[in-house]
Every structure is written in C-alpha cells, then in structure tokens.
Image: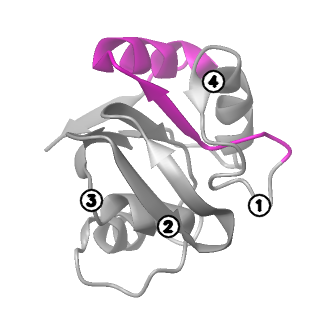
Amino acid sequence: MIIRLDEALKIAVGKLGDIEFKNGYYVYVGSALGGLKQRLKRHLKKDKKKRWHIDYLLEHAKVEGVFVWQSKKSVEDKIACKLTKKFDYIDGFGSSDSKCKSHLFYSKDKNQLVTALFKALRRQSVFVEF
C-alpha cells in the first residue's frame, strides 16, 4: 500500500507505543493470504476495530494506491527486507511475525517508493491508484 500522511504526527500504535510519523509517503508491505478483496476492504474502511499496527496509521493517513503481487507463497518478507536497506522505517511496525525489522517504509518522494517496489522482486506488478 502507498500511504500519504499530510502532517507529522505522534500516534499511539498498540504495543509499539507512541511513534513519531513524518509527513510524506509510506509503503506498507503485507500479505492477503486470506483473501485480497477482504483485506483491502478492511484496510480502506475508516470505522473498524484496531487489530494491526497499520490500522493506527490509516486512521490519520490516506491510501493512495496498492501494488499487488500474485504468488503461490508469501513474498512480503522478501520485499520488506529489501526495502529496509533503502528507506527509513519504523522498527517493529507490522513485523511481529517476520524476520525483517519492519514492514513500513518512509520517503518524502512517492516515486522513490514506487520505483523500489517495482525493483524489489523484479516481477511484473499491478498498481491500483485511488
């Protein structure tokens, strides 16, 4: 997901506690092994019980688009680990069950994030803009 936060904010994010978010763009890397349509519908819904770290950020930010990789196995860790080498990230965000340090990455420049996602797996992907 490509997410835009218009102003810097301190947000209480579950067990991670208070986190300072800079204004700019974020990429959240996740999987939808239980069903893509249902997962996206839930993430885009404003009124919901906060279950995941991303729910806390999405309460204040706008989803600008979604990249979708179709794969028979989970590829989110592979993508996230590559992005930790290129971008600032929020330590522990969305990665409680992951080998990677984070699944949320920051850049002031949306195009840098988009380009990095295309390169992360060097596969064809689909970008859905909202």
Amino acid identity at mark 4: Leu
Question: Who comes first in sequence, dot 1 or dot 4?
Answer: 4
Is residue 53 depicted above or below 64 in this figure?
below
Residue under pointer 4: 83
Residue plotted at (30% across, 20% down): 110
Which one is earlier in the sequence, the residue at label 3 or at label 4? 3
Q: Which residue is mark 2?
A: 12
Tag 3 and tag 4, C-beta contact below 8 Å: no
Q: Quadrant of the N terminus?
A: top left
| Viewer-nearest of discs 1 and 2 | 2
Mark 1 to mark 2: distance in Å? 17 Å
Residue at 31% x, 13% y: name it: 111
Tell me which amino acid carries mark 2: Ala
- Quadrant for residue 22, please give it: top left
Q: Nearer the viewer, residue 28 or 71?
A: 28
Q: Is residue 78 left or right of residue 104?
A: right
Earlier in the chain: of badge 2 and badge 4, it is 2
Q: Is residue 63 above or below residue 100?
A: below
- Residue 127 in the image: state x and y as whole percent: 29, 32
Whole-Å distance between the Cαs marked 3 and 4? 23 Å
Q: Which residues are magenta?
A: 99-124
Q: Which residue is mark 1?
A: 96
Query: Tag 3's secondary structure?
Result: loop
Position of 27 compared to 84: left or right? left
Number of other residues with Cα within 10 Å of mark 3, as a class: few under 14, some 14 to 19, many 20 or more? some
Q: Position of residue 21 (x, y in %)?
A: 43, 43
Mark 1 to mark 4: distance in Å?
A: 17 Å
Q: Nearer the viewer, mark 2 or mark 3?
A: 2
